[in-house]
Amino acid sequence: DPVKDKYIAVNYDATTAVEAKALNKEALQAEVGLPVDRKVPLVAFIGRLEEQKGPDVMVAAIKEVMEEEDVQIVLLG
């Protein structure tokens, strides 16, 4: 529940979601040492790094995606 979630920088509801999500993106970028930029797409995998969750699919695609797009990728597990 993003209204109460203590693990996100800015809590939000339906009326504040657009701006709060942008602020949360910037907070994540800063926390993991990426350039803070609202315009760059950020792809994040946040979950257990177990086969069931499929992180191998994302890892396999990272090189190709980064060669073709200006994108930031974060894997947290």
Image (cartoon, helix red, strand yellow):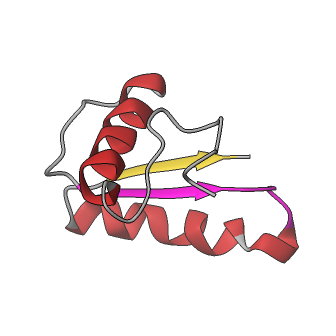
**Residue drawn at point x = 37 percent, y = 25 percent:** 30
In the image, residue 38 lies in the stretch drawn in magenta = no
Residue 59 located left or right of residue 15: right
Q: Is residue 56 above or below residue 45?
A: below
Tell me if residue 45 is in the magenta stretch: yes
Q: Nearer the viewer, residue 67 or 32?
A: 32
Give x and y (percent) for residue 5.
64, 44
**Along the horizontal axis of the image, is 20 left or right of 75?**
left
The residue stretch that appears in magenta: 41-50
Which residue is painted at 34% across and 68% down in the image?
65
Closest to the observer, 73 or 67: 73
Q: Position of residue 49 (x, y in %)?
A: 79, 56
Residue 45 location, x and y as percent?
Answer: 59, 58
- Residue farthest left in this picture: 39
| 9 relative to 43, above or below | above
Q: Quadrant of residue 67?
A: bottom left
Horizontal and vertical percent position of residue 77: 74, 46
**In the rendered image, the vertical position of residue 49 relative to residue 24, given as above or below:** below
Which residue corresponds to the image point at 26% horizontal and 58% vertical from the top-left? 18
